[in-house]
Image (tube, rainbow, N blue to C red):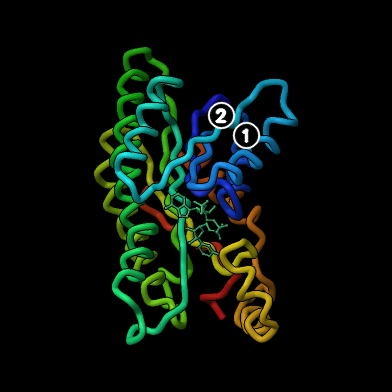
Amino acid sequence: MKDAIAVVTGAGSGIGQETAIRFAEEGARVILVGRTSSKLERVADRINSHLPEQVAEVFRADVTNEEDVQNLAQFIQKKYGDLHVLVNNAGVSSKSTILEMETSEWDRIQDTNLKSTFLVSKILGKVIADGRINDKDSGNVRDRAIVNVASLSGHKAGAQIPHYSSSKAGVINFTKALAVEFSQYGIRVNSVSPGYTITPLTEEGLKNNRFEEAIKRHTALKRVGKPKEIANVIAFAASSEASYMTGSDLLVDGGWLVT
Ligand SMILES: NC(=O)c1ccc[n+]([C@@H]2O[C@H](COP(=O)([O-])OP(=O)(O)OC[C@H]3O[C@@H](n4cnc5c(N)ncnc54)[C@H](OP(=O)(O)O)[C@@H]3O)[C@@H](O)[C@H]2O)c1
């Protein structure tokens, strides 16, 4: 990923943070996107403090907001003039039964997890595709990729997360549709589906010993995952090492589905 320009959404914590760090280690320039500037700046400082040149930059945006995403696209065009990698990682969850769920909560989860993946892929996908045309003109065609972060729950619906599970199933299928459409622009599109991973999204639930014990019981590797272990697979899918892979979902669940 040397000299690649990459966007990671939800880069202020958890899997997105580790992905941005890994990309920078691979030699990429990374634009960290999220709603909370302080979280993004902390990650950018962590990356930049080790390097002679600043490679991580913060852009505050809500990925459910079309205007914010358009502003992000304009910023990238103006500052970098190209984009090679997009990771749609921003996501949220909450617990509710279907009967007790407010429609607004259903919409919030669908918008953040699924609609944003469409919106950001559409708007930044155009920037990536335009860069490919310039590559062709210059005779130096680079690998270009989108990685969508889905979930184990998109394969097997989890208890009391019907909105989350269905949004992530949508991400897995949208990834395949996007892979077919974007192949003509030389953009590979894959999803990565993490199993239970320790991040701010799950840390509250994981404080419950019974929940953690249940995860261990149901996971072939007998433990929860670390964000870095998911970031490693995202980095593979985003890199030219995966140059013949598109429309795939990479399940990183410690063996949950096989037990
Ligand atoms: N942890 C797990 O066990 C697990 C398992 C399967 C899949 N995943 C998926 O992995 C991805 C990363 O989650 P994580 O576990 O690393 O949780 P996390 O630490 O909570 O990270 C999610 C990030 O998304 C950002 N975000 C949320 N809504 C946003 C919005 N509207 N616009 C821009 N940014 C937004 C959040 O920052 P702000 O609130 O500051 O915007 C946050 O930094 C998610 O898609 C999640 O569904 C996680």
> Where residue 120 appears, x then y in whole percent?
35, 43
Mark number, residue 29 = 2
Q: Is residue 104 left or right of residue 54?
A: left
Q: Residues within 10 Å of mark 2 (few under 14, many from 20)?
A: many
> Where residue 51 appears, x then y in whole percent?
72, 26
Q: Is residue 173 left or right of residue 55?
A: left
Q: Is residue 19 left or right of residue 129?
A: right
Q: Is residue 1 visible?
A: no
Disc 1 from disc 2: Cα separation = 6 Å
Q: Residues within 10 Å of mark 1 (few under 14, many from 20)?
A: many
> Quarter of the image containing the C terminus?
bottom right
Which residue is pictured at 38% across the width and 57% down the height?
112
Residue contact between numbered discs 1 and 2, judged by CB atoms under 8 Å: yes
Mark 1 residue element: helix
Q: Nearer the viewer, residue 255 or 207?
A: 207
> Where residue 252 appears, x then y in whole percent?
55, 62
Q: Is residue 151 left or right of residue 68?
A: right
Mark 2 residue element: strand
Which residue is pictured at 42% across the width and 39% down the height?
145
- The three-letter code of the residue at mark 2 reads Arg
Q: Is ligand 1 less than 8 Å from the beta carbon at label 2?
A: no
Q: Does label 1 or label 2 sit earlier along the sequence?
A: 1
Q: Residue reaching furthest top?
A: 138
Considering only vertical position in the picture, is 228 above or below 256? above
Considering only vertical position in the picture, is 146 above or below 192? above
Which residue is pictured at 56% across the width and 64% down the height?
201
- The three-letter code of the residue at mark 1 reads Ala
> Quarter of the image containing the N terminus?
top right
Which residue is pictured at 43% across the width and 42% down the height?
61
> Where residue 87 appears, x then y in whole percent?
46, 45
Residue highlighted by disc 1: 24
Considering only vertical position in the picture, is 136 above or below 163? above
